[in-house]
Amino acid sequence: MTDTRMLIGGGRPAVDPATSMAVTSPVDGRELGRIADATADQVHDAVTAATDAFRAWRRTSGAERARLMHLLADLLERDAEELALLETSDNGKLLRETRTQARFAARNYRFFAGLADKIHGRTVPLDAWDTFDYTVREPVGVAALITAWNSPMQLLANKLAPALAAGCTVVVKPSELAPLTTLRMAELVTEAGFPDGVVNIVTGGAEAGVALTTDPRLGRISFTGSVETGQAIQRAATAALVPVTLELGGKSANIVFDDADLERALPVAVAGIFAAGGQTCIAGSRLLVHERVHDRSCEQVAETARRIVLGDPTDDATQMARWRARRSGCGSRPHRPRPHRRCAAADRRWHSRRRRTSPRLLRRADGLRARRSGVGPRQQEVFGPVLATPPVADEEEASPSANVTEYGLAQRQSGPRMSPAHTGSARELAAGTVWVNTYRYSAAQAPFGVVKKSGYGRERGVEAIDEYLHTKNVLIDL
Ligand code: NAD
């Protein structure tokens, strides 16, 4: 059983049963533990602990911060299987996906450990020779790190690794729907030897999040979650003039040109939307297929979707997790009804439009839908295994069609030729990541981020550390 107590200034306050929240597995509805619904005072204490610890932590050498981060990565690797199992029971993801994410998290800590002693400024040549000017890059202070339920270990690593490398102290708040691996991290950072107060972890729901994001002592808020919550956090941060990183929802497009190798492109497109049950921000939920190969592609996608093996997420044969709990965790209240609601609304629109226009093709595959017309759930994030498949007439039309949503997360295009038209449209796509002939591949070294309503800021890659640093200019009269 995981220790579900919060971590505040090195202490682990007991969970008050009277105000605690149940954490239940979406897989089978089992109660996995109870977490504190942090009070505003407890959140305040966590920010105070981080503020107090910041003075000493920022003075530690980059080499020392890197040493501790490598130790943390060692512990993540040591406990990877346990962490993966814990995350699978907590958020219902396939075990092989959570195993990958545990390894990815460890890799992230190592990558940013490598940057911790390479943070430097520059000298600035001035007109006056008797004045010496240089810059230093300094940690922004206390960072609030708030994460979503769908990939807690990986999302935390995206934020915590660059924050620690930069010399920031942090207050972490995981989603109340899947907090257990983050709480396990409380034990791992302590075991690695991070000083008390450098990493603090509070639990709870929106109220705890509001208490955290309205604290004016923060130097940065980094948030991953829905657009609606991101907007609320942006408003709070604006009032306190705290800079924000926002990693929000998406509605990513796969573009399949008519010269694409369909045998290669379509399985990747299927994985792009149906991996993790479509519950990833980068889900390729719009398949824009050239009209010459459109119908053939839809048939093939629907056929592949029909063959997806549903089952126990810990079973290696399972391709999409089946969740049995109706009233627990991420598989129910907030998330399960949305795909169904959106599809029902799309059905109504489609039927009313059909009366006015020529009949359009609607395909269903085991409750998963591929839709030919432009009336599918094309505009809003569904966060589920729902795919819209509008046709596109030519390469010219592809990028504007892909850019039609308010979101700007990943986009992908397929086609064997790297012609100017292809590379040109990669430039035109409004997205933080463009994959060509692949999907979902990501690395600690490569920047990941978003544009438009999907948010702003960058995680991973050398760019991410900038989110936790500011530049100070120093002038010396010689
Ligand atoms: P959510 O917005 O409901 O919750 C995210 C976090 O915010 C949770 O910890 C929650 O407790 C907290 N929160 C809720 N209200 C708050 C408030 N008013 N102030 C401060 N904190 C508050 O999101 P979710 O349902 O957990 O996650 C799904 C969403 O996350 C999807 O839209 C998905 O696309 C997005 N996501 C984006 C990325 C990315 O990198 N862009 C990655 C994963 C998930």
Image (cartoon, rainbow, N blue to C red):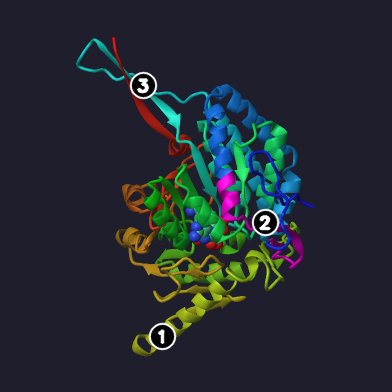
Q: Which amino acid does label 1 sit on?
A: Pro
Question: Can you say whether 447 is above or below 324 in the image?
Answer: above
Question: If you read the primary sequence from the N terminus, does the residue marked by circle 2 or circle 3 appear first?
Answer: 2
- Give the foreground label among 1 and 2: 2
- Assess whether residue 158 is covered by the magenta stretch: no
Residue beneath disc 2: 36
Question: Can you say whether 144 is above or below 33 in the image?
Answer: above
Residue located 66% across and 42% down the image: 103
Q: Residues within 10 Å of mark 1 (few under 14, many from 20)?
A: few
Marks 2 and 3: CB-CB under 8 Å?
no
Q: Which amino acid does label 3 sit on?
A: Arg
> Which is nearer the eye, 418 or 466?
466
Locate residue 90 relative to residue 288 in the image: left or right. Answer: right
Q: Is residue 183 visible?
A: yes
Residue positioned most to the front:
41
Q: How far apart are marks 1 and 3 (CA)?
A: 64 Å
Tag 1 secondary structure? loop
Locate residue 71 relative to residue 348 in the image: left or right. Answer: right
Residue located 52% across and 46% down the image: 144
Residue positioned most to the right:
1
Marks 1 and 2: CB-CB under 8 Å?
no
